[in-house]
Image (spheres, helix red, strand yellow):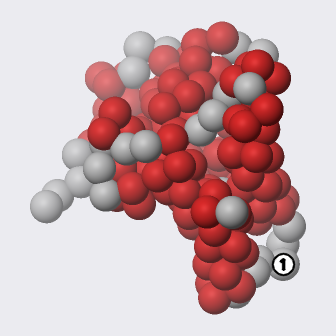
Amino acid sequence: MRTSKRTQILEAATRVVRHEGVKSVTFDSVAAEGGLTTGGLLYHFASCDDLVQAIHQHLADRWEADLVAAAGKPAAEATRDERLAAYTRVAVQSATRAELLLMLEGSTNTAHTAVWEAVTERGTPSPASAADDPAALDPFTIRLAADGLWLYESLTSERLDPATRRAVAERIADALDQ
């Protein structure tokens, strides 16, 4: 199946973020990265702000699809523990510098933050539930461990080998059964 121009643009923009940071996303930089024209970008995105918002949504949609695949069912049909185990497995397979930079930069923009919160709210326990229910503290701690592994993979140049990454993710997910 042929990749749509919109997806091609978003993938090029993600590469710009990964290599140069969010502030470097311009129509010119994305066009150059993707071998596209700025006119082609303007056809799909009215402004750079629209493009950055779409990058957030694109990556969050990928996370959502990965969560459904890892759980074997949509979040609405999965138990809390199934959603959290899926989140743990996805967190370690998709850690990218681009996601980290977008999340950090987007943390001061409610529209950008909302995109990511929608995904994590469906997949993980909230801190509020942990405060209100001591039994929810362990699942929330497991979420933090998965987030820590994701952050480690996003920040370090020394990547874990796939077998170690899977073993750590499984160890975190197995804590749900205790």
How many numbered marks does the figure carry?
1
Looking at the rendered structure, the kind of residue marked 1 is Glu
The residue depicted at 41 percent of the width and 14 percent of the height is 46
**Position of the N terminus by quadrant:** bottom left
7 lies left or right of 105: left
Disc 1 crowd rating (10 Å Cα; few below 14, some 14-19, many 20+) is few
Q: Which of 159 and 2 is in front in this view?
A: 159
Q: Position of residue 125 (x, y in %)?
A: 63, 34
Choose top left, top right, bottom left or bottom right for residue 69: bottom left
85 above or below 103?
Answer: below
Residue at left offset 72%, top offset 37%: 135
Q: Quadrant of the C terminus?
A: bottom right
Residue 22 visible from this viewpoint: no
Instruction: Name the secondary structure under disc 1.
Output: loop
Q: Looking at the image, which residue is at 31% across and 58% down?
A: 72
Q: Where is residue 91 in the image (x, y as percent from the top left)?
A: 62, 56
Tell whether 133 sits left or right of 30.
right
The residue to which callout 1 is attached is: 158
As rendered, which of 5 and 103 lies closer to the eye? 103
Residue 9 is left or right of residue 175, and the answer is left
